[in-house]
Image (spheres, rainbow, N blue to C red):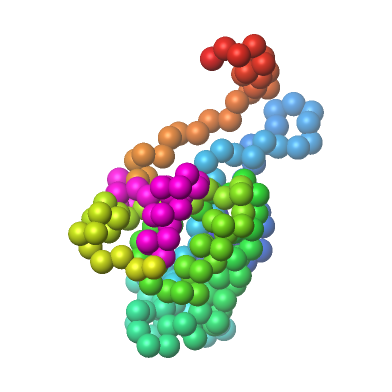
Amino acid sequence: MLDGFSFTQPRQFDPRFFLYDIVRRPTTGDEVGTPLEGVFHIYKLHGSVNWSRKAENEIEVEPEPTPDSACLIYPAKGKYQQSYVQPHLELVSQYFSVLREPNTCLIVTGFGFNDDHLSEPILAAVRTNPHLRLIIVNPSSDDITAGRKEKNKYWETLFSLAKQGEDVWLINANFGDFAEMIPDLKSLTPAQRLTRDIKLMAGTK
């Protein structure tokens, strides 16, 4: 998982870590490693309960930061303005950028689509990026889409796009249950890829 923090202690926020990748070191003479499968980029746009803002304005991972040092955007008046303070500004910028990337899967969890400045880019990306797959994980998805719970305009539009066949998926689960659903992805060896391609060309499974 890449979350924008260093791999050394204390873990400090540096957006350059989002540009890194985790690779498997080659055992042959090849110079290029194989990207490790199952690596996620995680963007906590509103901060995290274990982020602490230090005096030097550095952000560090800390088990129990004090309320004064906690690096969080609380659901209160002015939270939109707080999005333009680091590290939130950098995280939102990274978030906007990745929505335009090809072959991207965006998993949205713990978000009710009540913030226009975060919801609008998702909706725009679904409509304009044909390579984007959107997975929305919410334990109330079934109730919201069935009308048993109030839904906002974004839920209505995304549900409509999903029914029209767009690559939008609504999953009724909490994060823990969803994590158990994610398969253990393993990359294919060159021989396995060749076998797969031959089967595809031959029209066999």
Residue in the picture at 51% in, 62% down: 123
Left or right: residue 188 versus residue 148 is right
Which residue extends farthest left? 148
- Quadrant for the C terminus, please: top right
How far across and how far down the image is residue 158, in percent?
43, 57
How far across and how far down the image is residue 84, in percent?
55, 82
Left or right: residue 47 versus residue 141 is right
How far across and how far down the image is residue 9, in percent?
52, 62
Region rendered in magenta:
154-177
How far across and how far down the image is residue 190, in percent?
68, 22
Residue 110 versus residue 198 in the image, above or below = below
Residue in the picture at 59% in, 66% down: 96
Left or right: residue 120 versus residue 17 is left
Looking at the picture, tell me which residue is in the foreground, 181 or 138.
138
Q: Look at the image and say whether residue 163 sits in the magenta stretch.
A: yes
Q: Look at the image and say whether residue 6 sits in the magenta stretch.
A: no
